[in-house]
Image: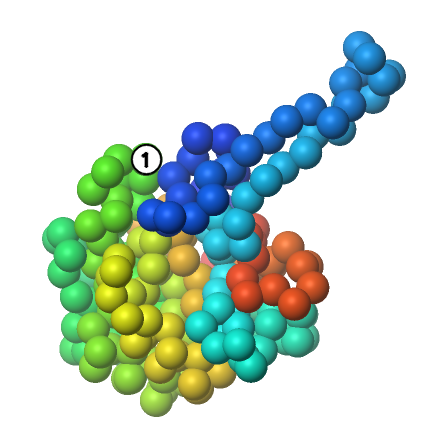
């Protein structure tokens, strides 16, 4: 079993402009006899799954998908990338997989400023993944570049594909794995943090 999830903690990286992660004590053992910690974060904190509602006010939310939808037969696509470099269409394999995990190596920069100068899906790659029925997982903050239109999101969601972002540890995986990406079960969620694990 491989853990592909970044831990959630105050001070962790968040997408530019998104809320930061905060925690505060709601109750303490010393004062109340038990401990309860409150959390503040966005639906796209850390390793998370995007739903179509993220870009379309009429799009599906995560709770509209059956639980089985978050189990994937995945193929790892090793594609080391540089700063702001597009993941090109020729890297999309012919496969019977459900999910493509694009391993760019970018999770190595987690916590550094350069993490947000990440590789992203080219227009043609997003179109190809949608056409082939692939869900997409990336070890970067997004499938689209910062500040650009959300073409890749829209293209994938138009084909009812899911997107998993901010993955880590993809370099440890064999080429084919079963992935469970279980989002926090939020109601009407445009996305949600997820615990993502892979099994050989």
Q: Is residue 128 visible?
A: yes
Q: Residue at x 60, y 58 (%)?
A: 183
Q: How many marks?
A: 1
Compared with residue 175, is residue 150 higher up or lower down, i.e. above or below?
A: below
Q: Residue at x 69, y 24 (%)?
A: 25
Classify residue 27 by image quadrant. Answer: top right
Q: Nearer the viewer, residue 16 or 113?
A: 16
Q: Nearer the viewer, residue 162 or 169?
A: 162
From the viewer's perspective, is 133 left or right of 91?
right
Label 1 environment density (alpha carbons within 10 Å; few <14, some 14–19, many ≥20):
few
Q: Can you identify the residue that label 1 sits on?
A: 111
**Residue at screen point 40% across, 58% down:** 165
Residue 64 shown left or right of residue 169 in the figure: right
Relative vertical location of residue 50 with respect to residue 58 in this rendering, above or below:
above
Q: Residue furthest bottom?
A: 131
The colouring scheme, among rainbow, by chain, secondary structure or one colour, is: rainbow
Name which residue lies at 69% across and 64% down. 187
- Whole-percent x, y for residue 193 in the image: 55, 52
- Residue 136 image position (x, y, % from top left): 39, 69
């Amino acid at each position: 079993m491989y853990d592909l999830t970044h831990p959630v903690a105050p001070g962790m990286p968040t997408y530019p402009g998104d809320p930061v992660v905060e925690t505060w004590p709601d109750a303490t053992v010393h004062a109340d006899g038990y401990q309860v910690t409150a959390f503040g974060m966005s639906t796209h904190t850390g390793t998370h799954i995007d739903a179509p509602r993220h870009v379309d006010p009429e799009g599906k939310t995560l709770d509209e998908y059956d639980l089985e939808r978050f189990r994937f037969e995945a193929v790892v696509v090793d594609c080391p990338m540089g700063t702001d470099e597009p993941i090109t269409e020729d890297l999309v394999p012919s496969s019977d997989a459900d999910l493509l995990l694009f391993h760019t190596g970018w999770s190595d920069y987690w916590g550094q400023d350069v993490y947000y100068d990440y590789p992203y899906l080219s227009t043609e790659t997003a179109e190809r993944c949608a056409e082939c029925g692939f869900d997409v997982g990336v070890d970067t903050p997004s499938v689209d570049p910062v500040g650009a239109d959300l073409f890749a999101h829209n293209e994938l969601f138009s084909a009812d594909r899911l997107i998993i972002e901010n993955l880590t540890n993809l370099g440890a995986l064999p080429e084919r794995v079963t992935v469970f990406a279980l989002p926090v079960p939020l109601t009407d969620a445009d996305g949600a943090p997820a615990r993502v694990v892979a099994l050989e």
